[in-house]
Amino acid sequence: MVIGLDASGDFAAPPTTEGFGSSAVAAATMPREGRSEIARWTEQRLIAWGREDLGELHAAALNWDQRREVCAMLGARDDLHAAVIATSNVLLRGQNAVEAHRARQLGVAETSLAGAKTDAGRRRGERAVRLLAGGRVGQSRLSDREYVLAAMVPPAVMNAAQRAFCFYAADEWRPEMGELALAMDDATPATVRYVSESLLPVVGGDQRFRLVTPEHWRNDPLHPLLAQALHPDGDGYRPQRLFGERIDWVRSHDEPAVQVADFAAWVVCRTISNPREAIARECFDLLRSVLGGEGGRCFELYSIGSVQPEDAAIYAHLHSAEQPQQWLEG
């Protein structure tokens, strides 16, 4: 099963952003056959639209009629799901808050580096520490905007994994669910690529995060994904074993899961930022079945500090009234 990642927005906190700005990271999960079918559909529609030059589904480059058609196609499928993590310049709490958050993450990275057990882990940790501290890797230096984007990748991935556990629980999906492979657009800034790749082990490390798995996966024979990722003491999962230790950096042209993530992130951002734009809301509603998750939420919020009730209230009208019936309760 492939989880494709992409982002939309500028990920800026005040004072560099004027007014209200929304940003999002999306992680779209789909099986091999679905990816092939979407690729064929895309090729045919780009020809029909006279947009062969585009070569992929890229939301910002299409017009509204084309976006609506894409969203209708995606929303009609029952084999793909997208986890979206959204933020805004309001939720980022200002430049000082972002800098303090980055400093705390630097401390976590330094601790992780001290405990690295392999040469590859040490190289990855050294690179992350250098970038988080403001140093260079090659010609690249990590901006605070890029830091925010990179910091949102792990929760997007974890939410995508939970969706995979919920929506691909049936035994018919066992061959696909033996592995969760991560793929992200190789056009992502180099510094974000470095830190995104490093933050997955840093956030996980030897720590365990909680995912709710289908009960029948523990029956004999044990589900292959659990056999691979279950912590030795049987409590929780090891991120490196669940996703692997790296992200595959791919051309978005070549990976439909990344293109779907692009659409999900773009449509969510556009709908949040332009509440009076009816066509954006129409596209969002067409994608609702793709986006829906726990409690019916169509996206989660990334905030520096706790999300306050008044913050969440701004977005409440965009969520679904009901939780998907396949959702697993822990």
Image (cartoon, grey):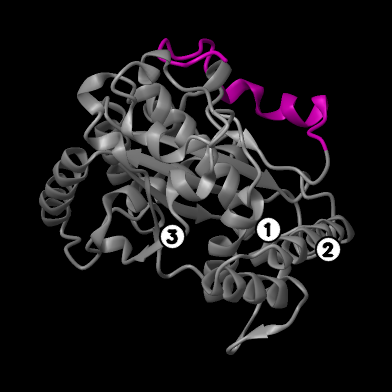
Q: Do the residues labelled 1 and 2 touch (CB within 8 Å)?
A: no
Q: Closer to the N terminus: mark 3 or mark 1?
A: 1
State the residue at coordinates (55%, 20%): 294
* Numbered label attached to residue 103: 2
The local crowd at label 2, few if under 14, some if 14 to 19, many if 20 or more residues have their Cα within 10 Å, is some
Picture coordinates of residue 235 (x, y %)? 59, 28
Which residue carries the number 3 mark? 247
Question: The C terminus lies in which quarter of the figure?
Answer: top right
Q: Where is residue 26 in the image (x, y as percent from the top left)?
A: 48, 45
Does 82 appear above or below 153? above
Name the spot of residue 10 as percent of width and height, x first.
62, 60
Q: Earlier in the sequence, mark 3 or mark 2?
A: 2
Q: Residue 8 carries which label?
A: none
Distance of mark 3 from mark 1, alpha carbons? 18 Å
Is 317 part of what is drawn in magenta?
yes
Specify start and end residues of the magenta stretch as a single range.
Answer: 306-330
Q: Distance between the residues labelled 3 and 2?
A: 24 Å
**Looking at the rendering, which quadrant does residue 192 occupy?**
bottom right
39 relative position to 120: left or right: left
**Is disc 1 surrounded by few (<14), some (14 to 19) or many (20+) residues within 10 Å?**
many
Residue 233 in view: yes
